[in-house]
């Protein structure tokens, strides 16, 4: 492909060069032709004609002077004009070609000599001096014949014919150049048209699988919907998503992952009937359009066939893989009045199918619309909630085990919807990411957390660091550094008092750019915490490259400590890894005093969880910090940890 691309560029460059050269040659030949024509007309025609004309008029003036008419001044004027014509033909740059006519130089020299000889007599000539006037006219009459012949020869002689021939030659060259110009221009236009068509094709097809892409299939879907209405048939829309594709990429590599997608594309194409279409929507998601369906059962049969074909054994470089997929199908117009809604229905059915284990498919069911309506309502009203500050932040303290001191707080989002009640933070973030509100939501959380810090400072409370969670889209798709810079400046929040928490899985979404992204944040002065550590797939090498300050042990490992017999080996490994990288460790989900003792025994000295406090509103966390500022121990330290109780 790169070699073919280079060849195309070279050919296009050659065509453009030919086009430019042809244009330049045509221009030069046109200029030369114009110059030759100018010389022929002005130098040859005009100059020689004027010489003859002035000679005749001077002789006629002499004849009138002999008859006593005219004046000496008129005779002198006509003489001077004749003299100037001779001078022009002898030395003018535009008459160079005329002087090349055989005999031209001799004629000009003889006429010049003769004019010098008679100059004194012309100046002394008075009207009525017929003898002098007649003698002068007789001396010039031979020149009249010679000038006449010279004038004719300037138009019809060999030199004139040579110039005309040269003009025709130049016109021929210009014509040939023009042909080259037209041909190269036409070729250039054809190449541009072909390139445009190729780019258009590429814009409508997936480069990896050669299948139509989302843009193409959306156009196809609209046309298929109109056709179904016109013919009275049904239209089946199948959305397919591969299961656990990320794990295959992580374990076998992206190269084999790409080959797997190509084989899946081939398997899907082999299942289709006449008029059916398959497209890759992006990532590991595909779409099949089934046209001309007579009954909904035919759609279910194709769904089963697609799932069965995908789930067959696949051999990739000696690796035996059994792919699995989740498929959702919806039928137009049975399930919705528009193909756009049918596509949404199929997507929803696919997500329901993912809840089943293994290869599975689900047909859209009417009650699923309730979930769709709920999502749409929440997405629409989440934007309003952000703009009108209808969301709130609660704060959960991070406590030092030995002293019971609050050393930082984590800001946690809360949304109580008037219709659906409490919406979990996970769902809020999911809706924001799905409907393009991630930037607005994250910036709102960061700004409110910074403003809360400023409120504590202005109220005289010993403020602690505030941690905010960054969603995956905010991290990978938006300019997080610019947002943080603007919000820190706007709120006056000291950068070193802000902790940015990013999950381990989020940093793995773009392994190559993640270190650079976090380095940019570190340059702002903020602290960085790696959240939910231990649940992702990061390697030690990747972790070493991330400029993080803290590791937060996922709550699932803390819960394992509550199992008998308990096994702290994983926690011990995480803490040892953190110590080797000079990172602070924070344990999440602490619920029992025994958890604190077990963690402290392994070297973890900080944690958060219901044992200390659930996430509380800003008023309650302010009370805790104010009490701590006044020397009151809000939480019991290590000395009496066994007697600690949950604080709700």
Image (spheres, grey):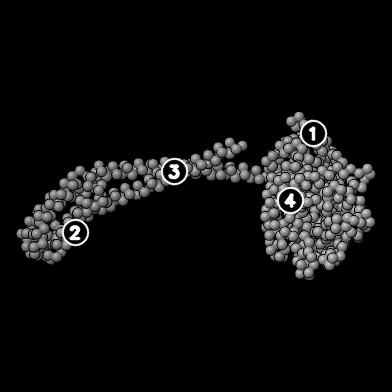
Q: Mark 3 points at which residue?
A: 21
Residue 140 location (% of width, % of height): 12, 53
Q: Which label sits in the foreground, 2 or 1? A: 1
Q: Earlier in the sequence, mark 1 or mark 3?
A: 3
Q: Distance between the residues labelled 2 and 4?
A: 99 Å
Marks 3/4: CA–CA distance: 60 Å
Marks 3 and 4: which is nearer the front? 4
On the rendered structure, is 101 left or right of 464?
A: left
Vertical comparison of 61 with 301: above or below: below
Instruction: Please report contact status of discs 2 and 1: CB closer than 8 Å, yes or no.
Output: no
| Secondary structure of the residue carrying numbered label 3 | helix
- The numbered mark at residue 81 is 2
For image coordinates 67% across by 53% down, the residue present is 520
Q: In this view, does 223 lie to the left or right of 20?
A: right
Regarding mark 4 in the picture, which secondary structure is present there? loop
What crowding class fits label 2: few (fewer than 14 Cα within 10 Å), some (14-19), or many (20 or more)? some
Q: Distance between the residues labelled 2 and 1?
A: 106 Å
In the image, 527: left or right of 416? left
Tell me the CA gap for discs 4 and 1: 36 Å
Q: Residue 251's mark?
A: none
Q: Mark 4 points at which residue?
A: 548
Q: Is mark 2 on a helix, strand or loop?
A: helix
Circle nearer the N terminus (3, 4): 3
Residue closest to the eye, 508 or 177: 508
- Say the numbered circle drawn on residue 321: 1
Q: How far apart are marks 1 and 3 (CA)?
A: 59 Å
**Circle nearer the N terminus (2, 1):** 2
């Amino acid at each position: 492909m790169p070699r073919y691309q280079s060849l195309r560029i070279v050919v296009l460059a050659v065509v453009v060069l030919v086009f430019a050269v042809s244009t330049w040659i045509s221009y030069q030949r046109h200029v030369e032709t114009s110059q030759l024509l100018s010389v022929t007309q002005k130098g040859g025609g005009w100059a020689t004609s004027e010489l003859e004309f002035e000679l005749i008029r001077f002789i006629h003036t002499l004849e009138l002077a002999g008859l006593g008419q005219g004046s000496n001044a008129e005779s002198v004027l006509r003489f001077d004009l004749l003299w100037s014509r001779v001078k022009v033909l002898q030395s003018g740059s535009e008459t160079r070609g005329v002087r090349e006519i055989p005999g031209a130089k001799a004629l000009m020299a003889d006429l010049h000599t003769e004019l010098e000889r008679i100059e004194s007599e012309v100046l002394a000539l008075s009207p009525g001096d017929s003898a002098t006037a007649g003698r002068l006219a007789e001396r010039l009459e031979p020149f009249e014949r010679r000038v006449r012949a010279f004038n004719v020869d300037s138009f019809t002689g060999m030199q004139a014919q040579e110039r005309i021939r040269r003009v025709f030659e130049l016109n021929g060259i210009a014509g040939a150049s023009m042909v080259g110009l037209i041909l190269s221009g036409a070729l250039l236009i054809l190449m541009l048209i072909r390139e445009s068509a190729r780019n258009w094709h590429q814009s409508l097809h997936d480069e990896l699988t050669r299948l139509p892409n989302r843009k193409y299939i959306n156009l196809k879907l609209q046309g298929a919907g109109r056709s179904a209405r016109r013919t009275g048939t049904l239209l089946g829309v199948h959305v397919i998503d591969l299961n656990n594709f990320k794990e295959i990429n992580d374990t076998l590599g992206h190269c084999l992952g790409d080959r797997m997608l190509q084989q899946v594309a081939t398997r899907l194409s082999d299942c289709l009937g006449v008029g059916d279409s398959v497209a890759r929507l992006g990532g590991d998601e595909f779409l099949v359009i089934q046209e001309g369906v007579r009954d909904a059962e035919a759609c279910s049969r194709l769904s089963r066939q697609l799932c069965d074909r995908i789930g067959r054994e696949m051999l990739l470089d000696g690796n035996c893989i059994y792919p699995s997929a989740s498929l959702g199908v919806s039928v137009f117009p049975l399930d919705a009045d528009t193909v756009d809604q049918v596509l949404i229905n199929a997507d929803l059915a696919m997500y329901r199918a993912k809840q089943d284990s293994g290869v599975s498919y689900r047909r859209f069911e009417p009650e699923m619309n309730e979930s769709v309506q709920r999502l749409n309502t929440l997405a629409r009203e989440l934007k309003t909630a952000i703009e009108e500050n209808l969301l709130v932040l609660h704060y959960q303290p991070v406590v030092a085990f030995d002293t019971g001191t609050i050393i930082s707080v984590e800001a946690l989002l809360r949304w109580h919807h008037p219709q659906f009640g409490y919406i979990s933070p996970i769902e809020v973030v999911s809706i924001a990411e799905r409907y393009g509100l991630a930037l607005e939501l994250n910036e709102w959380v960061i700004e409110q957390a910074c403003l809360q810090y400023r409120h504590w400072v202005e109220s005289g409370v010993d403020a602690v660091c505030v941690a905010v969670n960054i969603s995956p889209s905010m991290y990978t798709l938006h300019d997080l550094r610019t947002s943080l810079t603007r919000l820190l400046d706007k709120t006056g929040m000291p950068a070193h008092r802000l902790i940015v928490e990013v999950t381990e899985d989020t940093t793995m979404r773009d392994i190559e750019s993640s270190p650079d992204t976090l380095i940019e944040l570190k340059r702002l002065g903020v602290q960085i915490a790696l959240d939910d550590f231990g649940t992702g797939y990061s390697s030690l090498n990747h972790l070493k490259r991330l400029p993080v300050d803290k590791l937060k042990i996922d709550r699932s490992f803390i819960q394992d400590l509550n199992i008998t017999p308990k096994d702290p080996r994983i926690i011990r490994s995480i803490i040892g890894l953190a110590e080797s990288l000079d990172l602070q460790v924070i344990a999440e989900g602490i619920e029992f005093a025994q958890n604190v003792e077990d963690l402290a025994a392994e070297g973890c000295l900080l944690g958060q969880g219901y044992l200390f406090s659930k996430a509380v509103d800003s008023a309650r966390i302010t009370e805790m910090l104010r009490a701590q500022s006044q020397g009151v121990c809000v939480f019991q330290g290590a000395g009496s940890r066994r007697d600690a109780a949950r604080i709700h």
